Protein backbone atom coordinates (compact mmCIF):
# COMPACT_ATOMS: atom_id res chain seq x y z
CA UNK A 1 0.00 0.00 0.00
CA UNK A 2 1.40 3.40 -1.04
CA UNK A 3 2.23 5.63 1.94
CA UNK A 4 0.57 9.02 2.22
CA UNK A 5 1.27 12.14 4.20
CA UNK A 6 -1.27 12.03 7.07
CA UNK A 7 -1.02 15.74 7.84
CA UNK A 8 -1.80 16.77 4.28
CA UNK A 9 -4.64 14.29 4.14
CA UNK A 10 -6.23 15.53 7.38
CA UNK A 11 -6.01 19.12 6.19
CA UNK A 12 -7.64 18.15 2.93
CA UNK A 13 -10.37 16.33 4.84
CA UNK A 14 -11.01 19.34 7.09
CA UNK A 15 -11.40 21.59 4.05
CA UNK A 16 -14.12 19.31 2.73
CA UNK A 17 -15.91 18.78 6.02
CA UNK A 18 -18.70 21.23 5.34
CA UNK A 19 -19.77 19.18 2.32
CA UNK A 20 -20.11 15.96 4.30
CA UNK A 21 -23.86 16.26 4.89
CA UNK A 22 -24.82 18.05 1.69
CA UNK A 23 -27.30 15.27 0.76
CA UNK A 24 -28.55 14.76 4.30
CA UNK A 25 -32.23 15.59 4.78
CA UNK A 26 -32.84 17.17 8.19
CA UNK A 27 -36.61 16.80 7.96
CA UNK A 28 -36.46 13.11 7.08
CA UNK A 29 -33.88 12.33 9.75
CA UNK A 30 -36.09 14.13 12.28
CA UNK A 31 -39.05 12.05 11.13
CA UNK A 32 -37.04 8.88 11.71
CA UNK A 33 -35.92 10.05 15.15
CA UNK A 34 -39.49 10.97 16.12
CA UNK A 35 -40.80 7.58 15.02
CA UNK A 36 -38.10 5.83 17.06
CA UNK A 37 -38.53 7.92 20.24
CA UNK A 38 -42.33 7.88 20.21
CA UNK A 39 -42.49 4.13 19.76
CA UNK A 40 -40.03 3.46 22.56
CA UNK A 41 -41.81 5.89 24.88
CA UNK A 42 -44.98 3.87 24.32
CA UNK A 43 -43.16 0.57 24.93
CA UNK A 44 -41.66 1.82 28.20
CA UNK A 45 -44.99 3.19 29.47
CA UNK A 46 -46.75 -0.09 28.75
CA UNK A 47 -43.91 -2.05 30.33
CA UNK A 48 -44.41 -0.13 33.55
CA UNK A 49 -48.05 -1.23 33.52
CA UNK A 50 -46.82 -4.84 33.88
CA UNK A 51 -43.82 -4.51 36.23
CA UNK A 52 -43.58 -8.29 36.75
CA UNK A 53 -42.98 -8.90 33.04
CA UNK A 54 -40.57 -5.97 32.90
CA UNK A 55 -38.60 -7.34 35.86
CA UNK A 56 -38.52 -10.80 34.28
CA UNK A 57 -37.17 -9.39 31.02
CA UNK A 58 -34.50 -7.30 32.76
CA UNK A 59 -33.45 -10.19 35.00
CA UNK A 60 -33.09 -12.52 32.01
CA UNK A 61 -30.95 -9.99 30.18
CA UNK A 62 -28.60 -9.43 33.13
CA UNK A 63 -28.36 -13.18 33.76
CA UNK A 64 -27.21 -13.69 30.17
CA UNK A 65 -24.68 -10.88 30.53
CA UNK A 66 -23.42 -12.41 33.79
CA UNK A 67 -23.01 -15.84 32.16
CA UNK A 68 -21.13 -14.22 29.32
CA UNK A 69 -18.81 -12.45 31.77
CA UNK A 70 -18.12 -15.70 33.66
CA UNK A 71 -17.37 -17.57 30.44
CA UNK A 72 -14.88 -14.89 29.47
CA UNK A 73 -12.87 -15.36 32.66
CA UNK A 74 -13.04 -19.13 32.25
CA UNK A 75 -11.71 -18.64 28.70
CA UNK A 76 -14.60 -20.81 27.64
CA UNK A 77 -15.30 -21.20 23.94
CA UNK A 78 -18.99 -21.77 24.69
CA UNK A 79 -21.03 -18.81 23.50
CA UNK A 80 -24.11 -17.42 25.21
CA UNK A 81 -25.35 -16.09 21.88
CA UNK A 82 -24.19 -16.35 18.25
CA UNK A 83 -24.97 -14.29 15.14
CA UNK A 84 -28.02 -15.34 13.18
CA UNK A 85 -27.53 -17.23 9.95
CA UNK A 86 -26.41 -14.92 7.17
CA UNK A 87 -24.87 -12.31 9.50
CA UNK A 88 -21.34 -11.96 8.13
CA UNK A 89 -20.15 -9.15 10.38
CA UNK A 90 -18.41 -11.49 12.83
CA UNK A 91 -17.39 -14.31 10.51
CA UNK A 92 -13.63 -13.64 10.64
CA UNK A 93 -11.67 -15.94 13.02
CA UNK A 94 -10.32 -12.93 14.96
CA UNK A 95 -13.71 -12.53 16.63
CA UNK A 96 -13.37 -16.01 18.16
CA UNK A 97 -9.63 -16.03 18.80
CA UNK A 98 -9.64 -12.91 20.97
CA UNK A 99 -11.55 -13.47 24.26
CA UNK A 100 -12.03 -9.72 24.63
CA UNK A 101 -13.54 -9.25 21.18
CA UNK A 102 -15.59 -12.41 21.50
CA UNK A 103 -17.05 -10.92 24.69
CA UNK A 104 -17.71 -7.57 22.99
CA UNK A 105 -19.41 -9.34 20.10
CA UNK A 106 -21.66 -11.46 22.30
CA UNK A 107 -22.51 -8.60 24.63
CA UNK A 108 -23.59 -6.57 21.62
CA UNK A 109 -25.66 -9.47 20.24
CA UNK A 110 -27.36 -9.97 23.62
CA UNK A 111 -28.24 -6.28 23.84
CA UNK A 112 -29.55 -6.33 20.27
CA UNK A 113 -31.66 -9.40 20.95
CA UNK A 114 -33.06 -7.83 24.11
CA UNK A 115 -34.06 -4.60 22.35
CA UNK A 116 -35.75 -6.31 19.42
CA UNK A 117 -37.38 -8.79 21.78
CA UNK A 118 -38.88 -5.94 23.77
CA UNK A 119 -40.56 -4.74 20.60
CA UNK A 120 -41.90 -8.13 19.51
CA UNK A 121 -43.30 -8.75 23.02
CA UNK A 122 -44.87 -5.29 23.27
CA UNK A 123 -48.57 -4.51 22.93
CA UNK A 124 -48.03 -2.01 20.12
CA UNK A 125 -50.24 -2.30 17.06
CA UNK A 126 -48.61 -4.06 14.10
CA UNK A 127 -47.87 -0.91 12.10
CA UNK A 128 -46.22 0.86 15.04
CA UNK A 129 -44.39 -2.30 16.03
CA UNK A 130 -42.96 -2.68 12.51
CA UNK A 131 -41.76 0.92 12.48
CA UNK A 132 -40.20 0.66 15.91
CA UNK A 133 -38.50 -2.60 14.97
CA UNK A 134 -37.11 -1.10 11.75
CA UNK A 135 -35.72 2.07 13.32
CA UNK A 136 -34.36 0.14 16.29
CA UNK A 137 -32.50 -2.19 13.95
CA UNK A 138 -31.06 0.84 12.16
CA UNK A 139 -29.71 2.04 15.52
CA UNK A 140 -28.53 -1.44 16.55
CA UNK A 141 -26.78 -2.05 13.22
CA UNK A 142 -25.07 1.33 13.35
CA UNK A 143 -23.72 0.64 16.85
CA UNK A 144 -22.22 -2.76 16.00
CA UNK A 145 -18.64 -3.15 17.35
CA UNK A 146 -17.64 -4.24 13.85
CA UNK A 147 -18.20 -0.65 12.66
CA UNK A 148 -15.52 0.91 14.92
CA UNK A 149 -11.79 0.55 14.57
CA UNK A 150 -11.03 0.05 18.26
CA UNK A 151 -13.57 -2.75 18.70
CA UNK A 152 -13.04 -4.57 15.42
CA UNK A 153 -10.14 -7.08 15.70
CA UNK A 154 -9.90 -7.40 11.92
CA UNK A 155 -9.25 -3.65 11.63
CA UNK A 156 -6.77 -3.69 14.53
CA UNK A 157 -4.84 -6.50 12.85
CA UNK A 158 -4.84 -4.63 9.53
CA UNK A 159 -3.68 -1.46 11.26
CA UNK A 160 -0.73 -3.19 12.92
CA UNK A 161 0.33 -4.96 9.74
CA UNK A 162 0.10 -1.86 7.54
CA UNK A 163 1.39 0.54 10.23
CA UNK A 164 -1.80 2.55 10.01
CA UNK A 165 -1.84 2.98 6.25
CA UNK A 166 -5.26 1.30 6.07
CA UNK A 167 -6.77 4.18 8.06
CA UNK A 168 -5.03 6.76 5.92
CA UNK A 169 -6.27 5.07 2.75
CA UNK A 170 -9.69 4.77 4.34
CA UNK A 171 -9.80 8.51 4.94
CA UNK A 172 -8.90 9.07 1.29
CA UNK A 173 -11.71 6.72 0.29
CA UNK A 174 -14.12 8.57 2.57
CA UNK A 175 -13.25 11.94 1.03
CA UNK A 176 -13.79 10.55 -2.44
CA UNK A 177 -17.18 9.22 -1.43
CA UNK A 178 -18.10 12.58 0.11
CA UNK A 179 -17.38 14.15 -3.27
CA UNK A 180 -19.51 11.50 -5.00
CA UNK A 181 -22.31 11.81 -2.45
CA UNK A 182 -22.55 8.03 -1.92
CA UNK A 183 -20.67 4.99 -0.64
CA UNK A 184 -18.58 3.18 -3.23
CA UNK A 185 -19.70 -0.45 -3.49
CA UNK A 186 -17.51 -1.66 -6.33
CA UNK A 187 -14.37 -0.76 -8.24
CA UNK A 188 -16.04 1.66 -10.63
CA UNK A 189 -12.87 2.10 -12.69
CA UNK A 190 -13.37 -1.45 -13.96
CA UNK A 191 -16.50 -0.57 -15.94
CA UNK A 192 -17.47 1.67 -18.81
CA UNK A 193 -20.82 1.84 -20.54
CA UNK A 194 -20.60 0.75 -24.13
CA UNK A 195 -17.21 -0.90 -23.51
CA UNK A 196 -17.84 -3.76 -21.09
CA UNK A 197 -21.41 -2.95 -19.99
CA UNK A 198 -24.42 -2.46 -22.29
CA UNK A 199 -22.45 -3.73 -25.28
CA UNK A 200 -25.14 -5.69 -27.11
CA UNK A 201 -25.22 -4.28 -30.68
CA UNK A 202 -28.22 -2.22 -31.66
CA UNK A 203 -29.45 1.31 -32.29
CA UNK A 204 -31.82 3.91 -30.91
CA UNK A 205 -34.73 4.07 -33.37
CA UNK A 206 -37.05 6.48 -31.53
CA UNK A 207 -36.76 9.08 -28.81
CA UNK A 208 -38.72 11.80 -27.07
CA UNK A 209 -38.42 13.70 -23.79
CA UNK A 210 -39.03 10.58 -21.68
CA UNK A 211 -37.28 7.67 -23.36
CA UNK A 212 -35.21 6.21 -26.14
CA UNK A 213 -36.26 2.97 -27.82
CA UNK A 214 -33.34 0.64 -28.53
CA UNK A 215 -33.69 -2.03 -31.22
CA UNK A 216 -31.04 -4.75 -30.92
CA UNK A 217 -29.54 -6.57 -33.87
CA UNK A 218 -30.87 -10.13 -34.06
CA UNK A 219 -28.34 -12.86 -33.31
CA UNK A 220 -30.11 -15.73 -35.05
CA UNK A 221 -31.05 -16.34 -38.70
CA UNK A 222 -34.71 -16.63 -37.76
CA UNK A 223 -36.73 -14.87 -35.07
CA UNK A 224 -40.16 -15.18 -33.50
CA UNK A 225 -42.58 -13.04 -35.46
CA UNK A 226 -43.79 -11.67 -32.14
CA UNK A 227 -41.12 -9.15 -31.07
CA UNK A 228 -40.12 -8.69 -27.45
CA UNK A 229 -40.55 -5.27 -25.80
CA UNK A 230 -38.75 -4.91 -22.46
CA UNK A 231 -39.89 -2.20 -20.03
CA UNK A 232 -37.33 -1.69 -17.24
CA UNK A 233 -38.00 0.35 -14.08
CA UNK A 234 -38.04 4.10 -14.66
CA UNK A 235 -36.13 4.54 -11.39
CA UNK A 236 -33.12 2.64 -12.73
CA UNK A 237 -31.19 2.43 -15.98
CA UNK A 238 -32.03 -0.28 -18.44
CA UNK A 239 -28.60 -1.85 -18.63
CA UNK A 240 -29.23 -3.96 -15.53
CA UNK A 241 -30.69 -6.24 -18.21
CA UNK A 242 -27.64 -5.82 -20.43
CA UNK A 243 -24.66 -5.99 -18.08
CA UNK A 244 -21.39 -7.70 -18.98
CA UNK A 245 -21.66 -10.06 -21.92
CA UNK A 246 -22.05 -13.23 -19.82
CA UNK A 247 -24.54 -11.51 -17.49
CA UNK A 248 -26.92 -10.05 -20.08
CA UNK A 249 -30.57 -11.01 -20.18
CA UNK A 250 -30.96 -9.04 -23.42
CA UNK A 251 -28.25 -11.09 -25.12
CA UNK A 252 -29.86 -14.30 -23.87
CA UNK A 253 -33.20 -13.26 -25.40
CA UNK A 254 -31.50 -12.55 -28.72
CA UNK A 255 -29.63 -15.84 -28.68
CA UNK A 256 -32.95 -17.64 -28.16
CA UNK A 257 -34.40 -16.21 -31.37
CA UNK A 258 -36.23 -13.08 -30.24
CA UNK A 259 -36.42 -9.72 -31.98
CA UNK A 260 -35.70 -7.49 -28.98
CA UNK A 261 -36.53 -3.88 -28.16
CA UNK A 262 -35.97 -2.10 -24.84
CA UNK A 263 -37.01 1.23 -23.37
CA UNK A 264 -34.17 3.38 -22.04
CA UNK A 265 -35.85 5.87 -19.71
CA UNK A 266 -34.46 9.37 -19.43
CA UNK A 267 -32.98 10.41 -16.10
CA UNK A 268 -35.41 13.31 -15.50
CA UNK A 269 -34.24 16.72 -14.39
CA UNK A 270 -36.37 19.40 -12.74
CA UNK A 271 -37.72 20.56 -16.10
CA UNK A 272 -39.56 17.25 -16.39
CA UNK A 273 -40.84 17.31 -12.81
CA UNK A 274 -44.50 17.69 -13.83
CA UNK A 275 -44.52 14.46 -15.88
CA UNK A 276 -47.19 12.17 -14.46
CA UNK A 277 -47.94 8.44 -14.60
CA UNK A 278 -50.32 9.32 -17.46
CA UNK A 279 -47.42 10.91 -19.33
CA UNK A 280 -45.24 7.85 -18.81
CA UNK A 281 -47.95 5.82 -20.56
CA UNK A 282 -49.03 8.34 -23.22
CA UNK A 283 -45.48 9.43 -24.03
CA UNK A 284 -43.64 6.28 -22.98
CA UNK A 285 -45.00 2.76 -23.09
CA UNK A 286 -47.75 3.34 -25.66
CA UNK A 287 -45.51 5.04 -28.29
CA UNK A 288 -42.96 2.26 -27.70
CA UNK A 289 -45.61 -0.38 -28.44
CA UNK A 290 -46.66 1.49 -31.59
CA UNK A 291 -43.06 1.76 -32.77
CA UNK A 292 -42.33 -1.94 -32.22
CA UNK A 293 -45.44 -2.96 -34.13
CA UNK A 294 -44.68 -0.53 -36.97
CA UNK A 295 -41.05 -1.64 -37.34
CA UNK A 296 -41.82 -5.36 -37.25
CA UNK A 297 -45.28 -5.44 -38.82
CA UNK A 298 -46.39 -7.69 -35.95
CA UNK A 299 -50.02 -7.90 -34.90
CA UNK A 300 -49.06 -9.11 -31.42
CA UNK A 301 -45.95 -8.57 -29.30
CA UNK A 302 -44.55 -10.11 -26.12
CA UNK A 303 -43.95 -7.83 -23.13
CA UNK A 304 -41.37 -8.13 -20.35
CA UNK A 305 -41.19 -5.69 -17.43
CA UNK A 306 -39.48 -5.37 -14.07
CA UNK A 307 -40.59 -3.85 -10.74
CA UNK A 308 -42.26 -0.47 -11.28
CA UNK A 309 -41.80 -1.15 -15.00
CA UNK A 310 -44.13 -4.11 -14.48
CA UNK A 311 -46.69 -1.87 -12.78
CA UNK A 312 -46.41 0.47 -15.76
CA UNK A 313 -46.87 -2.44 -18.18
CA UNK A 314 -49.95 -3.67 -16.32
CA UNK A 315 -51.56 -0.22 -16.27
CA UNK A 316 -50.71 0.23 -19.95
CA UNK A 317 -52.36 -3.08 -20.82
CA UNK A 318 -55.45 -2.19 -18.77
CA UNK A 319 -55.71 1.24 -20.41
CA UNK A 320 -55.43 -0.25 -23.89
CA UNK A 321 -57.93 -2.99 -23.03
CA UNK A 322 -60.42 -0.32 -21.96
CA UNK A 323 -59.94 1.15 -25.44
CA UNK A 324 -60.49 -2.28 -27.01
CA UNK A 325 -56.84 -2.75 -27.88
CA UNK A 326 -54.89 -5.84 -26.85
CA UNK A 327 -51.46 -5.76 -28.52
CA UNK A 328 -49.78 -8.27 -26.18
CA UNK A 329 -49.65 -11.99 -26.89
CA UNK A 330 -48.02 -12.53 -23.48
CA UNK A 331 -46.69 -10.54 -20.55
CA UNK A 332 -43.78 -11.34 -18.23
CA UNK A 333 -43.51 -9.56 -14.88
CA UNK A 334 -40.31 -9.60 -12.82
CA UNK A 335 -40.75 -8.86 -9.07
CA UNK A 336 -43.74 -6.62 -9.71
CA UNK A 337 -46.25 -5.29 -7.19
CA UNK A 338 -49.81 -4.84 -8.42
CA UNK A 339 -51.37 -5.25 -5.00
CA UNK A 340 -49.57 -3.00 -2.48
CA UNK A 341 -51.32 -4.21 0.68
CA UNK A 342 -48.04 -5.47 2.17
CA UNK A 343 -44.95 -3.78 0.67
CA UNK A 344 -42.69 -5.27 3.33
CA UNK A 345 -40.26 -3.04 5.19
CA UNK A 346 -40.78 -0.22 2.67
CA UNK A 347 -44.08 0.25 4.48
CA UNK A 348 -42.32 1.94 7.39
CA UNK A 349 -41.68 4.91 5.10
CA UNK A 350 -45.26 5.11 3.88
CA UNK A 351 -48.07 6.45 6.03
CA UNK A 352 -50.33 9.46 5.72
CA UNK A 353 -47.96 11.86 7.50
CA UNK A 354 -44.89 10.81 5.52
CA UNK A 355 -46.72 10.85 2.18
CA UNK A 356 -48.08 14.32 2.97
CA UNK A 357 -44.54 15.40 3.78
CA UNK A 358 -43.36 14.28 0.35
CA UNK A 359 -46.34 15.93 -1.33
CA UNK A 360 -45.63 19.21 0.46
CA UNK A 361 -41.92 19.06 -0.29
CA UNK A 362 -42.46 18.28 -3.98
CA UNK A 363 -45.59 20.37 -4.61
CA UNK A 364 -43.60 22.94 -6.58
CA UNK A 365 -42.37 20.24 -8.96
CA UNK A 366 -38.82 19.08 -9.47
CA UNK A 367 -37.65 15.54 -8.88
CA UNK A 368 -37.28 12.95 -6.16
CA UNK A 369 -33.47 12.53 -6.12
CA UNK A 370 -32.24 9.12 -7.19
CA UNK A 371 -29.59 9.09 -4.48
CA UNK A 372 -32.26 9.52 -1.82
CA UNK A 373 -34.26 6.63 -3.26
CA UNK A 374 -31.11 4.50 -3.37
CA UNK A 375 -30.38 5.29 0.30
CA UNK A 376 -33.90 4.23 1.27
CA UNK A 377 -33.47 0.86 -0.46
CA UNK A 378 -30.02 0.41 1.09
CA UNK A 379 -31.45 0.96 4.58
CA UNK A 380 -33.58 -2.14 4.12
CA UNK A 381 -30.35 -4.16 4.15
CA UNK A 382 -28.09 -1.80 6.06
CA UNK A 383 -25.49 -4.35 7.19
CA UNK A 384 -24.92 -5.62 3.65
CA UNK A 385 -25.40 -2.39 1.70
CA UNK A 386 -24.07 0.28 4.06
CA UNK A 387 -22.00 -0.89 7.04
CA UNK A 388 -20.18 -3.63 5.15
CA UNK A 389 -18.70 -0.98 2.87
CA UNK A 390 -18.03 1.47 5.69
CA UNK A 391 -15.83 -1.16 7.35
CA UNK A 392 -14.17 -2.34 4.14
CA UNK A 393 -13.60 1.06 2.53
CA UNK A 394 -12.97 3.40 5.46
CA UNK A 395 -11.57 1.21 8.25
CA UNK A 396 -9.70 -1.41 6.26
CA UNK A 397 -8.84 1.00 3.45
CA UNK A 398 -9.76 -1.47 0.74
CA UNK A 399 -11.18 -0.98 -2.72
CA UNK A 400 -14.22 -3.23 -3.21
CA UNK A 401 -13.89 -5.79 -6.03
CA UNK A 402 -15.50 -5.12 -9.42
CA UNK A 403 -19.12 -6.25 -9.69
CA UNK A 404 -21.29 -5.14 -12.60
CA UNK A 405 -24.60 -5.24 -10.71
CA UNK A 406 -23.24 -2.97 -7.96
CA UNK A 407 -21.85 -0.55 -10.56
CA UNK A 408 -25.35 -0.33 -12.04
CA UNK A 409 -26.87 -0.03 -8.55
CA UNK A 410 -24.78 3.08 -7.89
CA UNK A 411 -25.89 4.67 -11.18
CA UNK A 412 -29.12 6.04 -9.72
CA UNK A 413 -31.87 7.96 -11.49
CA UNK A 414 -34.44 10.50 -10.35
CA UNK A 415 -38.23 10.24 -10.38
CA UNK A 416 -40.40 13.15 -11.40
CA UNK A 417 -42.17 14.70 -8.44
CA UNK A 418 -45.62 14.35 -10.01
CA UNK A 419 -45.18 10.66 -10.74
CA UNK A 420 -43.52 9.86 -7.41
CA UNK A 421 -46.18 11.45 -5.20
CA UNK A 422 -49.04 9.96 -7.26
CA UNK A 423 -47.40 6.52 -7.07
CA UNK A 424 -46.96 6.74 -3.28
CA UNK A 425 -50.52 7.81 -2.56
CA UNK A 426 -52.56 5.85 -5.08
CA UNK A 427 -50.65 2.60 -4.95
CA UNK A 428 -48.60 2.24 -1.78
CA UNK A 429 -50.80 4.19 0.62
CA UNK A 430 -54.33 3.68 -0.72
CA UNK A 431 -53.78 0.53 -2.85
CA UNK A 432 -56.27 1.72 -5.46
CA UNK A 433 -54.84 -0.22 -8.40
CA UNK A 434 -56.48 -3.48 -7.33
CA UNK A 435 -59.94 -1.86 -7.36
CA UNK A 436 -61.66 -1.97 -10.77
CA UNK A 437 -61.88 1.68 -11.71
CA UNK A 438 -59.95 2.68 -8.61
CA UNK A 439 -57.65 4.86 -10.68
CA UNK A 440 -58.21 6.59 -13.99
CA UNK A 441 -55.36 6.86 -16.48
CA UNK A 442 -55.27 8.26 -20.00
CA UNK A 443 -58.93 9.15 -19.67
CA UNK A 444 -60.22 5.65 -18.86
CA UNK A 445 -60.77 3.64 -15.66
CA UNK A 446 -58.15 0.98 -15.00
CA UNK A 447 -59.27 -2.60 -14.43
CA UNK A 448 -56.49 -5.19 -14.09
CA UNK A 449 -59.11 -7.90 -14.61
CA UNK A 450 -59.14 -6.98 -18.30
CA UNK A 451 -55.60 -8.37 -18.67
CA UNK A 452 -56.34 -11.83 -20.03
CA UNK A 453 -53.27 -12.81 -22.02
CA UNK A 454 -50.89 -15.54 -20.72
CA UNK A 455 -48.69 -14.20 -17.91
CA UNK A 456 -45.33 -15.32 -16.53
CA UNK A 457 -44.89 -13.89 -13.03
CA UNK A 458 -41.40 -14.18 -11.52
CA UNK A 459 -40.81 -13.33 -7.88
CA UNK A 460 -37.79 -13.96 -5.66
CA UNK A 461 -37.91 -15.50 -2.23
CA UNK A 462 -35.61 -12.98 -0.48
CA UNK A 463 -37.00 -9.87 -2.18
CA UNK A 464 -37.08 -6.95 0.28
CA UNK A 465 -38.55 -4.46 -2.22
CA UNK A 466 -41.39 -6.49 -3.75
CA UNK A 467 -42.10 -9.26 -1.19
CA UNK A 468 -43.00 -12.45 -3.03
CA UNK A 469 -46.08 -13.22 -0.95
CA UNK A 470 -47.50 -9.86 -2.04
CA UNK A 471 -46.55 -10.25 -5.69
CA UNK A 472 -48.25 -13.66 -5.54
CA UNK A 473 -51.59 -11.85 -5.26
CA UNK A 474 -51.21 -11.08 -8.98
CA UNK A 475 -52.29 -14.67 -9.64
CA UNK A 476 -55.75 -13.62 -8.41
CA UNK A 477 -55.87 -10.18 -10.06
CA UNK A 478 -55.00 -11.09 -13.64
CA UNK A 479 -57.45 -13.27 -15.57
CA UNK A 480 -55.22 -14.91 -18.18
CA UNK A 481 -53.35 -18.24 -17.85
CA UNK A 482 -50.75 -17.70 -15.11
CA UNK A 483 -47.31 -19.24 -14.63
CA UNK A 484 -46.00 -18.20 -11.21
CA UNK A 485 -42.29 -18.85 -10.61
CA UNK A 486 -40.32 -18.17 -7.43
CA UNK A 487 -36.60 -17.68 -7.84
CA UNK A 488 -33.90 -17.93 -5.21
CA UNK A 489 -32.07 -14.84 -3.86
CA UNK A 490 -33.33 -11.25 -3.93
CA UNK A 491 -34.77 -8.43 -6.01
CA UNK A 492 -31.79 -8.07 -8.35
CA UNK A 493 -29.60 -11.18 -8.06
CA UNK A 494 -32.64 -13.42 -8.27
CA UNK A 495 -33.56 -11.94 -11.65
CA UNK A 496 -30.05 -11.66 -13.10
CA UNK A 497 -29.27 -15.38 -12.91
CA UNK A 498 -27.75 -16.29 -16.29
CA UNK A 499 -28.50 -19.70 -17.72
CA UNK A 500 -24.83 -20.24 -18.63
CA UNK A 501 -23.89 -20.05 -14.93
CA UNK A 502 -26.78 -22.33 -13.90
CA UNK A 503 -26.71 -21.17 -10.27
CA UNK A 504 -29.28 -21.30 -7.49
CA UNK A 505 -32.75 -22.78 -7.99
CA UNK A 506 -36.38 -21.84 -8.56
CA UNK A 507 -39.82 -23.18 -7.63
CA UNK A 508 -42.67 -23.95 -10.04
CA UNK A 509 -46.02 -25.71 -10.31
CA UNK A 510 -47.39 -24.99 -6.84
CA UNK A 511 -51.14 -25.12 -6.26
CA UNK A 512 -52.80 -21.74 -6.63
CA UNK A 513 -56.01 -20.54 -5.06
CA UNK A 514 -55.02 -21.25 -1.46
CA UNK A 515 -52.46 -18.54 -0.78
CA UNK A 516 -48.72 -18.10 -1.13
CA UNK A 517 -47.66 -20.43 1.68
CA UNK A 518 -49.67 -23.31 0.27
CA UNK A 519 -48.24 -22.63 -3.18
CA UNK A 520 -44.68 -22.95 -1.88
CA UNK A 521 -45.50 -26.08 0.16
CA UNK A 522 -46.77 -27.79 -2.98
CA UNK A 523 -44.22 -26.36 -5.43
CA UNK A 524 -41.38 -28.22 -7.12
CA UNK A 525 -37.81 -26.99 -6.62
CA UNK A 526 -35.73 -27.00 -9.81
CA UNK A 527 -31.95 -26.46 -9.76
CA UNK A 528 -30.37 -23.80 -11.95
CA UNK A 529 -31.57 -20.63 -13.65
CA UNK A 530 -35.21 -19.81 -14.29
CA UNK A 531 -34.17 -18.23 -17.62
CA UNK A 532 -34.36 -21.59 -19.43
CA UNK A 533 -37.81 -22.26 -17.97
CA UNK A 534 -39.03 -18.84 -19.12
CA UNK A 535 -37.65 -19.39 -22.65
CA UNK A 536 -39.56 -22.68 -22.97
CA UNK A 537 -42.71 -21.00 -21.62
CA UNK A 538 -42.42 -18.09 -24.07
CA UNK A 539 -41.95 -20.42 -27.04
CA UNK A 540 -45.01 -22.39 -25.93
CA UNK A 541 -47.17 -19.25 -26.27
CA UNK A 542 -47.01 -19.46 -30.04
CA UNK A 543 -45.68 -17.32 -32.83
CA UNK A 544 -43.97 -18.34 -36.06
CA UNK A 545 -40.33 -18.27 -37.04
CA UNK A 546 -39.53 -15.73 -39.75
CA UNK A 547 -36.24 -14.56 -41.29
CA UNK A 548 -34.48 -12.11 -38.98
CA UNK A 549 -34.53 -8.48 -40.17
CA UNK A 550 -31.34 -7.44 -41.90
CA UNK A 551 -31.31 -4.07 -40.18
CA UNK A 552 -32.79 -2.39 -37.14
CA UNK A 553 -35.56 0.17 -37.39
CA UNK A 554 -37.21 1.13 -40.70
CA UNK A 555 -37.83 4.21 -42.82
CA UNK A 556 -40.31 5.66 -40.34
CA UNK A 557 -38.09 4.76 -37.39
CA UNK A 558 -34.52 5.21 -38.66
CA UNK A 559 -31.35 4.63 -36.65
CA UNK A 560 -30.63 7.70 -34.53
CA UNK A 561 -27.50 6.58 -32.71
CA UNK A 562 -25.79 3.38 -31.67
CA UNK A 563 -26.82 1.51 -28.54
CA UNK A 564 -26.78 2.02 -25.63
CA UNK A 565 -27.90 5.52 -26.62
CA UNK A 566 -27.20 8.86 -24.97
CA UNK A 567 -29.94 8.83 -22.30
CA UNK A 568 -28.26 6.06 -20.34
CA UNK A 569 -25.15 8.20 -19.76
CA UNK A 570 -26.96 11.00 -17.90
CA UNK A 571 -25.79 11.06 -14.28
CA UNK A 572 -27.69 12.13 -11.17
CA UNK A 573 -26.15 15.18 -9.51
Image (tube, rainbow, N blue to C red):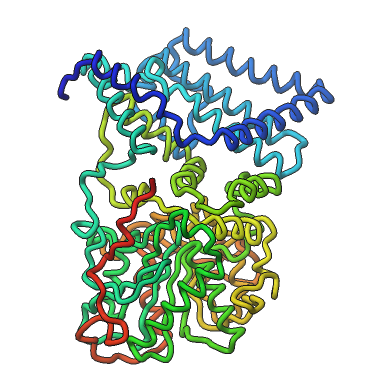
Q: Is residue 194 left or right of residue 149?
A: left
Q: Is residue 184 left or right of residue 472?
A: left
| Residue lying at 36% horizontally and 76% vertically, measured from the top left | 535
Q: Could you tell me which quadrant the C terminus lies in?
A: top left
Q: Point out the residue furthest to the left here.
A: 2
Residue 327 placement (x, y as % from top left): 48, 86
Give the answer, above or below, for where 401 lies relative to 281: above
Of residues 415 and 111, the one nearer the viewer is 415
Give the answer, above or below, for where 305 lies relative to 36: below
Of residues 138 and 507, the one nearer the viewer is 138
Where residue 16 sits, quadrant-wise, is top left
Residue 174 placement (x, y as % from top left): 33, 28
| Residue lying at 69% horizontally and 17% vertically, measured from the top left | 59
Numbered circles on residues, count: 0
Residue 482 placement (x, y as % from top left): 54, 77
Q: Is residue 544 visible?
A: yes
| Residue lying at 55% horizontally and 29% vertically, measured from the top left | 139
Of residues 7 and 75, the one nearer the viewer is 7
Q: Could you tell me which quadrant the N terminus lies in?
A: top left
| Residue lying at 45% horizontally and 33% vertically, measured from the top left | 22
Q: Is residue 158 visible?
A: no
Give the answer, above or below, for where 533 lies relative to 19: below
Q: Is residue 382 left or right of residue 450?
A: left
Amino acid sequence: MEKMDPQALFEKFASKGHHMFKDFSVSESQEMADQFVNSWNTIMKRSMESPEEWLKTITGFYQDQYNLWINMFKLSSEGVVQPVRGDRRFSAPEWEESPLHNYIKQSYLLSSRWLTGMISDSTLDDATKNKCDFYTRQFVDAMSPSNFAMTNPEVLKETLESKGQNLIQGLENLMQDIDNGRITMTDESAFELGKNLATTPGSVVFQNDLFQLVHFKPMTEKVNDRPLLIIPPCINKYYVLDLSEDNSYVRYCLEKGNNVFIISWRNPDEALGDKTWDDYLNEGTIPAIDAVKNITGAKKINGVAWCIGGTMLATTMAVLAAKRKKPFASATFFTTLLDFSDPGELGVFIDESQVKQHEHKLKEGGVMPGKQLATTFAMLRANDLIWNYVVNNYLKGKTPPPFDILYWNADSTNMTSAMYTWYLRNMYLENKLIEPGGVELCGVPVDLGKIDCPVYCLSTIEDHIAPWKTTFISTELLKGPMQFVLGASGHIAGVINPANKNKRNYWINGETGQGADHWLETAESVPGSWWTHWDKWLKSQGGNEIPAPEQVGNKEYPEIEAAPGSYVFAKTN
